Amino acid sequence: MHVDTIAAISTPMGEGAIAIVRLSGDEAIQIADRIFRSPSGKKLAKEPSHTIHYGHLADPATGEIVEEVMVSLMKAPKTFTREDVVEVNCHGGLVAVNRVLQLVLKEGARLAEPGEFTKRAFLNGRVDLSQAEAVMDLIRAKTDRAMNVALNQMEGKLSRLIGELRQALLETLAQVEVNIDYPEYDDVEEVTIPLMIEKGTWVRDEIDKLLQTSSQGKILREGLSTVIIGRPNVGKSSLLNSLVQENKAIVTDIAGTTRDIIEEYVNVRGVPLRLVDTAGIRETEDIVERIGVERSRQVLKEADLILLVLNGSEALTIEDERLFEAVSGMDMIVVINKTDLPQKIDMQKVKELAGNGRVVTTSLLKDEGVDELEEAIAGLFFEGNLEAGDFTYVSNARHIALLHHARAAIEDAIGAAEAGVPVDMIQIDVTRTWEILGEIIGDTVQESLINQLFAQFCLGK
């Protein structure tokens, strides 16, 4: 079957040392040969796979030299897509890379859809669906831990475990088929029911282990939504700047300076934080500030972690106590700021209001206490010493949802087996579990979902 040739720019747009235009498909090498001019007159089709060649690109219609290039040649099937792949390395300017792309499109390639290279790798059996999704996780990783999780998934660690679970279920289904085909033998049923309970319980326990890592895995993948709250002028913006190590927020002595929501990603001891600096929450007549305060209240509802900042040089106020009430029951770290000034805050009262939340003291003006705060954040979510390589993390929301569905289905099967339900009825739940797990790796997934998933990828990946 003929496979059309796709092309796209695979490096970020903008000025840089080099840019790469990637081609994949049956005519990738022929298209490259038509436009490639080597000083020695070599033809790429006759060159060995996985070699790189210096030369120029020229428009066949006019003979005009378009760009000086290095062309990487990779012949099927030992390529990412398992198709012929050519990568044109050119100068990194916007004009240069676009001229190269337009030339290959003119010669017969078509512009790739988002994620189409990885989609072809999946469709050609190079990777399964969970490995393909890990490609984007790898690109978007914001910490070393997040990158390690994506690498493990891309190398098939999750796929292998899912495969083992499905194989156990398949063996159980085979035993059920024997029971259905030979109902006259009582000993077959005596073997089948205990086997279903044993295998089903093992599968359920393994799913539970995966789900135990899901909350941390999701944090590694998407970032921990962390909201900085407090009364105006207690040091919220200074805290943001200390964690980000840049002056992203305006810091002044004037209360109410932050009028809107400021977001920034930051890596804190391997924990990716999506930091949100809010407008100081207080009663105000200023219309613009009031809008900011309302937005602050809204983001509180979506937060994974609250950093509640208090002014250590002032006594607790009614507004402070209302903030504690607003975040009651949420994961919280209380930051007592301005310890460089004479302390007036009631620390005992703060600890009572904080409940199980950690209390950290800082002087952001003198850059004191930030290390302790970072340790508290890491300790709260990763117990300080948990490494991404220790577990098979599940970080993808789609995978987590499917694992919950699979667990419910196998739990139904175990319950039915223990209640003495006929094996052909139990078989329905076991088969359903096997199919749901197959959706994670793409064995039993619908085409519409595949298209939707790859549409979220970058162009050229």
Image: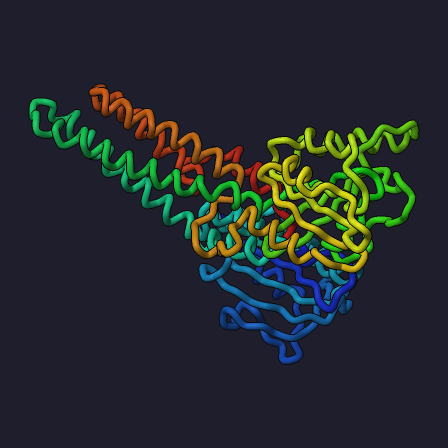
Position of 181 compared to 167: left or right?
Answer: left
Q: Can you see residue 236?
A: no
- Tell me where residue 77 sits by quadrant: bottom left
Position of 1 compared to 417: left or right?
Answer: right
Identify which residue is drawn at 56% across, 51% down. Answer: 379
Tally the marks: 0
Q: Position of residue 422 (x, y in %)?
A: 21, 20
Viewer-side residue, 414 vs 298? 298
Q: Position of residue 198 (x, y in %)?
A: 23, 36
Q: Residue furthest bottom?
A: 40
Identify which residue is drawn at 57% across, 69% down. Answer: 44
Identify which residue is drawn at 60% across, 36% down. Answer: 355
Q: Position of residue 36 (x, y in %)?
A: 66, 68
From this view, report whether residue 429 is shown above or below residue 12: above
From this view, report whether residue 50 is shown above or below residue 130: below
- Identify the coloring: rainbow
Q: Position of residue 423 (x, y in %)?
A: 21, 23
Viewer-side residue, 388 vs 199? 388
Viewer-side residue, 237 vs 172? 237
Viewer-side residue, 28 vs 339? 339
- Tell me where residue 358 sits by quadrant: top right
- Tell me where residue 187 sits by quadrant: top left
Position of 114 compared to 153: left or right?
Answer: right
